[in-house]
Amino acid sequence: MNIKDIIISNNFRYKKSLGQNFITDMNLLRAVAADSGAGKDDTVVEIGAGAGGLTLALSEAAGKVCAFEVDNSLESILKETLKDCANTQVIFKDVLKMSDAEIAEIAGESFCVAANLPYYITTPLIMRFLESSLGVKSLTVMVQKEVAERITARHNTKEYSSITLAVDFYADAEIKRIVGRNMFFPVPNVDSALLKLTVVPDKYKVKNKEKFLKFLNSAFYMRRKTFANNLNAVFGLEKEKIGQILSDCGYSQSIRGEALAMADFLKLYERIF
């Protein structure tokens, strides 16, 4: 019996409120597991086990799988889908409400993250793991195509934003594959992309990480405003002083945040603060 048949035989009702759009094509799911890079020496934390298709593919590739799911009504389906997966544990909890210590107790000190994410929790969940003290090696997540394009954007493009920089601060990002909407059931309104984030510890060395991340975010506080105006609004810095520093560093005083790459932000942060 395939996964779609298991879902049907259990009379499962999809919950729009939980963003439930499942993939049942095992060839695609095994490709996603391969893209994660997880091997027999790795533990994988899966977020949103759903009907267990990706969980099954991950269990074949990895040494251990800890799959988290918030919908208890999927328990009977998961038991059937994963009946032969001795290396897999399903935990019916919301990781966004769990502490680092609680997750580490289940998954261990080092692991990869994999997920077919509901669109509405994409950014909070990615940042929850990137900003954590957990030993996350990578995140391989199915997200809305538009979100993947924003996260991997280059400066001077309309997709470039604060989330681009926030993710780049912690990890190297790449789109592994585009997945059409018809690969999901129920069919969503948009296409998806498989995004892989490879965590790079201490990728950028800055004084006061929290302040630097606020600095990055402030550049897009009001997108149509200049960088100097946004810094003035967020930090209360004098626009004349910021303008002079921009000129001294070779930038236009009217430059906007989207025109600055991470290297530019690092240089300006050092000078301004």
Image: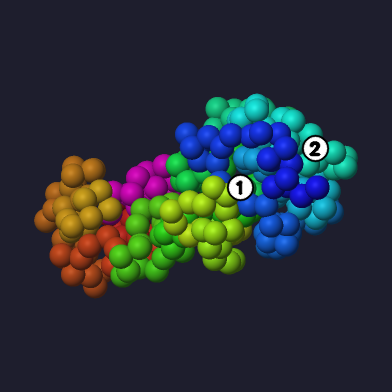
Residue 252, percent across and down?
Answer: 18, 70
What residue is drawn where x is 22% and y is 62%?
256
Residue 255, percent across and down?
Answer: 20, 65
Callout 2 environment at 10 Å: few (<14), some (14 to 19), or many (20+)?
some
What's drawn in magenta, residue-wise? 206-219
- Residue 207 as seen in the image, left or right of residue 2: left
**Looking at the image, residue 174 lies above or below residue 103:** below
Q: Is residue 43 visible?
A: no
What residue is drawn where x is 78% and y is 42%?
81
Residue under label 1, please give it: 22
**Are discs 2 and 1 less than 8 Å apart at CB?**
no
- Whether the magenta-drawn stretch holds residue 215 is answered as yes
- Whether the magenta-drawn stretch holds residue 179 is answered as no
Numbered tag placed on residue 80 in the rendering: 2
Numbered tag placed on residue 221 in the rendering: none
**Looking at the image, residue 80 lies above or below residue 227:** above
Q: CA distance from mark 2 to mark 1?
A: 16 Å
